[in-house]
Amino acid sequence: MDEGDLEAKRFAINRLSAWRAVTALPHALESTLSILTARLIDTSETQQNPSWLTLRQNYAAAIIRMVNGLVDPLQAGAYARSIASIAAQLGLPSWLVELRHAATHEDLPSLEMLREAARESLTWLLHNYFLPTINPSAPRSSTAPPLRPVAPLLKQYKTLMKIVTRDASLRKQNQPDIDAIMRDIERWLSEAKLAADFAVDAFGWDTIDGNDVEQEDPREKWALERLCDALIEKGALVSLSQKRRNLLSDEFVPPHSSLVLWTPLLAHTHTYHPTFPSVLTTRIVENLLYERPSTGFDMDVVSLEADESQNDPSYHLTLAKWAAWVIKAYDNGQENGELSLRKNVIILLASTLAPGKTEGAKKIDVLAALLGAVSSGFTELQKASDMLLSVTYPLQPQHWNAGDLTVMNERLRSLMSLDDESQKYTNDLDSAPTTLLPTQSSDIGGWRLLDHHTGWKSCPIGVYYPNHAAL
C-alpha cells in the first residue's frame, strides 16, 4: 500500500469494519485495522489536528494488541514462557517486543519510533499472513530459529534420576533440579508446537478451540511425536546395555531399572497432555513395523545415542515391552469416540500380521509377542489374536522318517485287530457292532516309505503320471 494513498487506507478500513460488523475477524486483520486507523488519523488532513499524546496512545495501543494477540494464544503450556522467546520463534522483530514492554510499563515511546513500529508491523503481517494466505503454495521464508534438541534435557533428567535411585537420601537435594528439568521439557513441547509449521495457521491465525476437548491439535501431536522419537532412541527408554535389557522376567514388562527412571517423566507428561500415551504407543509400534525415515525437517531433534538399532532384537523387544506397559498403565478402556490404546495397537499389528502380509516383514516374533501381551486377559481380543497368530507363521514342510512309519503301522495293526473280532459276527450280521470294519479279503502289507528309488516323485493332487509306481 502506498504510504500516502489515503483513499486506499480508507477503503481498507471500511472493508475491514464491514466484515467486523458481521463476524469476528482473525487477529491479523484486527491488528491491521487498528494500525491503519492510527496511521489514517496521523496523516489525514481533514481530521482535526490531534495532540501528539493522542497519536502516541493510538499507535501504542495498536502495537501492544498486535504483539499480545500473537503471543498469548501460544502460552497454552503448563509453564509460562517469556514473550521474547515466543516472538523469536514467530520471527517477530525483537525491538517490537521491547517497544510493547516500554509502552505498557514505562514511558510512551516517541512518535517517530511508534510510526516506524507501525510500518514494521504492517510489513511483518504482509509477509507472514497476507501473502501466504493469497498464495498458500508459495514457499515462505522463515526467520525463526530452529527448534532446540530435546536430547540434552532427557540426558540431564536421566542423570539426576540415576543419582536419586542409587541413593534415596539424595532425593530431597536433587528433587528441585528434577522438577526444573520437567518444566524445561514442558517448555520445549510448547516451543515444538510453535515450530510445527502447518502452513499459515502456524502463527495462530486459525487457532484450535480450547473449549473443544475432542478436537485434536495437530501441532501438539507433532510436538509429542518429536518427544516420543527422542524417548524411543537407545539410551532413553531402552538402555544402552544389552545385559540390562535381557533380564529374565515372567512378565512382558520393561526392566525395573528403566521403569524407576522414566515413569515419573511419563506420568508428568501425561498429566498435561492426555494424548501422550496414544502417541507414544503409536510411535513405538511404527518403529517396530517400519524403517525409521529421516524427518525431512530442518529442525534438529537429535537422538541420544546414534547407533545401529534396526538389527538389534533386544532393542525391539524392550520397545515392545514399553508399549505393553504404557497400555496397561494408561488404557482405561473408555474410548470416548476414539479407539482405546489397546485396540489401536492391535489394529496396527493386525495390518502387518494378517495372512499374506508377513512376507518380507521384519521383527515378526517381537510383533507377535506384543500382540499376545496386549490381548492377554481380554477373552474376545485374545481369541482374535490367537486366530491371527495361528496363520501368521507358515507351515513348514514335513519330512518323514522311520519313527513316523512305526507309529502309523501300530495304528494300522490296532485297526486291523478289529477284523478278527468282526469274524465272530459273520453269521449274525444283525448283532454285529456298527463300528467294526468290514472283512478284508486280502492281506494288507502296511505302510512303506516311497522315494526316488521306487520310481515315485511328488506332484500336485489331481495330476496323473502314467509311469509312477502304484501306491
Image: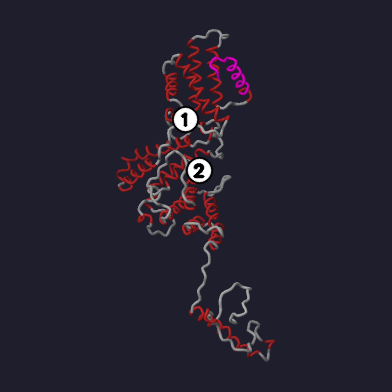
User: Which element type, helix, strand or loop, lies under badge 1?
Assistant: helix
Give the side of residue 20 with respect to residue 372, left or right. Answer: right
Q: How many discs mark residues in the rendered view?
A: 2
Q: Dot 1 corresponds to which residue?
A: 90
Query: Tag 2: residue type?
Result: Thr
Q: Return the disc, 1 or 2, that comes first in the chain's sequence.
A: 1
Query: On the rendered image, what quadrant is the N terminus found in?
Result: top right
Q: Where is residue 161 shown, x and y percent of the image?
A: 35, 45
Query: Tag 1: residue type?
Result: Leu
Q: Where is residue 197 shown, x and y percent of the image?
A: 50, 36
The span picked out in magenta is 1-19
The local crowd at label 1, few if under 14, some if 14 to 19, many if 20 or more residues have their Cα within 10 Å, is: many
Give the side of residue 287 with respect to residue 20, left or right. Answer: left
Q: Is residue 457 above or below residue 164?
A: below
- The numbered mark at residue 368 is none
Q: Dot 2 corresponds to which residue?
A: 275
Q: Where is residue 139 shown, x and y percent of the image?
A: 52, 33
